[in-house]
């Protein structure tokens, strides 16, 4: 089916990382459907743990799909966790399409293990791909937008960043301390970036998607796909929100965290103070803290996580 000749992203260019499969693929196809020219990035390793030989196949297949529908796309098969290759990715968008307007960070791997069994390499590799990978592309995209603004005499430019966190950060995930930590770091990176780049006209937001992909095949093993109709856990439920956040219509949305899956979008508030206690003397004593905090937590279930998880009823994703 041919892409429409007009769309809200017409004339814009986008980079989508990890776009050869799953969520990234659905997001790249959606951005193209809305009119954007897309750089499809994927390192192409077959294992969800980052194992196996890198391959250009996944990225090139998505590019071919976009082009077959009349869209514009080019493949990039570099590793976003490598500083130089991330710079080359952003530069490719500029070289091919004249500038970069939208950055969607999605690339990631899993190396699950309980915290008492996790190796240093299992920790480092997940932090490297998720958190460092998000930083690298953000850093070079931000520099590109800042230079464009300076060249335009300080005028605001068009820039959108959509980062990918997870409900593992919101609600906890016992077997994923590395993944949950990386996803929490991505939220912090996003809110910092949102504040830093707002003056240039750039927004940065972060999503927590729930979707059936090779990354989550264990998580949703008990939720079978329906015999007919769209799977409630299909990545296609997530992609429209990414397309919207990349569009001019979302100019007023910045530094926000949104959970999305199966026809639902939830806006997560920043953490709020739930209770406050003041010492009756210059500093707290152990006995005073024991009396105040032990009583406060007495009626709460052991291990209960913070309010965002309570409100959304979220589980690992």
Image (cartoon, helix red, strand yellow):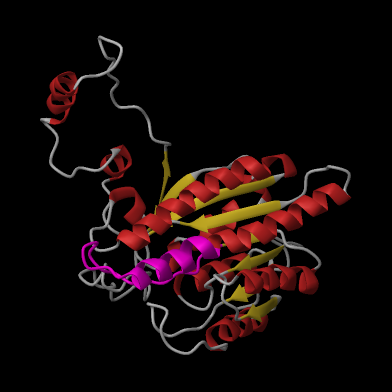
Does residue 263 appear anywhere in the picture? Answer: no
Q: Which residues are magenta?
A: 105-133
Q: Residue 72 at what x, y percent from top left?
A: 71, 75
Residue 151 visible to the viewer? yes
* Magenta span includes 125: yes
Query: Which of 5 and 260 lies nearest the eye of the viewer?
Result: 260
Give the percent coordinates (x, y) of residue 16: 59, 68
Query: In which quadrant of the rendered image does the N terminus lie?
Result: bottom right
Displayed quadrant of residue 17: bottom right
Residue 177 higher or lower than 290, as above or below = below
Q: Residue at 67% of width from left, 65% of height from top?
A: 14
Q: Horizontally, is 240 left or right of 214 in the view? A: right
Depth check, front residue: 262 or 281: 281
Quarter of the view holding residue 89: bottom right
**Residue 287 falls left or right of residue 308:** left
What residue is at 89 percent from the left and 44 percent from the top?
A: 153
Horizontal and vertical percent for residue 170? 34, 49
| Frontmost residue, 301 versus 242 | 301
Q: Relative to 219, is 195 above or below?
A: above
* Left or right: 312, with 20 as reference point: left
Q: Is 25 placed above or below 181 here? A: below
> The C terminus is located in which quarter?
bottom left
Question: Is residue 198 shown in magenta?
Answer: no
């Amino acid at each position: 089916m041919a892409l429409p000749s007009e769309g809200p992203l017409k004339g814009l260019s986008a980079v989508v990382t990890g776009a050869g499969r799953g969520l990234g693929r659905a997001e790249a196809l959606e951005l193209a459907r809305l009119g954007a020219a897309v750089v499809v990035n994927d390192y192409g390793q077959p294992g969800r743990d980052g194992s196996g030989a890198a391959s250009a196949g996944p990225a090139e297949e998505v590019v071919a799909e976009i082009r077959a529908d009349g869209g514009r796309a080019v493949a990039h098969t570099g590793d976003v966790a490598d500083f130089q290759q991330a710079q080359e990715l952003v530069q490719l968008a500029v070289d091919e399409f004249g500038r970069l307007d939208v950055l969607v960070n999605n690339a990631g791997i899993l190396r699950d293990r309980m915290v008492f069994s996790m190796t240093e390499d299992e920790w480092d590799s997940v932090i490297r791909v998720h958190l460092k990978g998000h930083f690298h592309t953000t850093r070079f995209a931000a520099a590109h937008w800042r230079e464009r603004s300076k060249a335009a005499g300080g005028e605001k430019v068009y820039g959108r960043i959509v980062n990918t966190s997870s409900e593992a950060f919101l609600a906890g995930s016992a077997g994923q301390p590395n993944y949950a930590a990386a996803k929490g770091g991505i939220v912090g990176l996003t809110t910092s970036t949102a504040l830093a780049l707002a003056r240039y006209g750039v927004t940065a937001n972060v999503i927590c998607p729930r979707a059936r992909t090779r990354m989550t095949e264990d998580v949703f093993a008990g939720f079978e796909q329906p015999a007919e109709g769209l799977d409630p856990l299909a990545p296609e439920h997530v992609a429209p929100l990414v397309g919207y956040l990349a569009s001019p219509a979302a100019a007023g949305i910045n530094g926000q965290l949104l959970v999305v899956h199966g026809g639902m979008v939830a806006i997560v508030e920043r953490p709020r103070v739930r209770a406050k206690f003041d010492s009756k003397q210059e500093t707290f004593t152990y006995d005073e803290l024991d009396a105040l905090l032990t009583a406060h937590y007495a009626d709460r279930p052991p291990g209960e996580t913070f309010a965002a998880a309570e409100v959304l009823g979220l589980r690992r994703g």
